[in-house]
Image: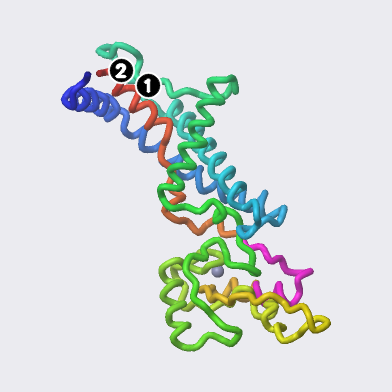
Amino acid sequence: MRGIQDVYSATKKVVDLWSYDSKTVLYSSSIGALVFPVSLGLIQHFVFRTISIANGHLLAPVLGLAAVGLSGCASAIAVTEASYRLRVKQNYYYWRDEPAIFKLPKPYSLDDKDLKLLAAYFMGTVIVFKVFRGRFASVLPSTVKSPGAFANEGIIGSHRYAHKSQRQKIVQIGQKFGCHTCGRKWFIKSFIADHQPPLSLSRNNKTKKYLLGLLQYPKVQQKLYPQCVRCSLKQQKHLQSPGNYSEVVSHASSLRIYHLFLPLPYIWAFLQDVLNHL
Ligand SMILES: [Zn+2]
């Protein structure tokens, strides 16, 4: 049974060795951290937007999970590649084995071992994303016809225009969570209280209409969400002319804490190096 002291001294040894090459670790980790949101943005724009699947879709959570996991694998590979290209080979004669930092596994031959490693990167990224309170559906684009990818808090609304206290509350929510459709929150002067579903679509407007005196449209609860002027205009255009203006809005550049990617290959190598020195 190893004591805390052993773990501490092994960790210290590994930190000492790694610190010789700290620039490589830092630069390659930064590249991985860049690749993750870029990859998510590309999938959002070129896959989900192209096939018009938005955050409200039934399959959105599953598709979002797949996008997060795949982007995590892409980032891990970017970290590995950058690590090999940037590294300054150190003298490690006092190590029993070659340190794991110098031989990050390259999962390119796609044999069983590689697939296991990629599965570990996939799952690891998904877990980190969840720990940072990410919602899988929110990596898909938004649609102007339903609560968007950044719709966190809304307030109960009615079929009338929002009154003053509701508008004030909406501005507060907007400053905290951003526009519910595109996620932008910096440099936005004012947020509009957006009705969801949009008033012009809401069946509730027609609840008084009965079909043969028997059927009634189901009541839909109106909610209000903060929306920026740009998205509000997109919504208006789409509702007026659905054939000419898409309802889908991408938000690849709106980053949140869950877009943070941890350099999983290094974390794994670090643990291995510590274990080798116990
Ligand atoms: Zn917006």
Give the image quarter of residue 275: top left
Residue corresponding to mark 1? 100
- Check contact, mark 2 vs mark 1: CB within 8 A: yes
x and y, in percent, of residue 259 in the image = 46, 50
x and y, in percent, of residue 94 in the image = 25, 13
Q: Quadrant of the C terminus?
A: top left
Query: In the structure shown, which secondary structural element does the residue marked by tag 2 occupy?
Result: helix
**Residue at image location 66% in from the left, 52% down from the top:** 48
Q: Is residue 45 magenta?
A: no
Q: Quadrant of the N terminus?
A: top left
Q: CA distance from mark 2 to mark 1?
A: 9 Å
Q: Amino acid at mark 1?
A: Ala
Residue corresponding to mark 2? 276
Picture quadrant of ligand 1: bottom right
**Residue at image location 58% in from the left, 73% down from the top:** 230
Span colored in magenta: 235-249
Asked if residue 194 is positioned above or below residue 98 in the image, the reply reads below
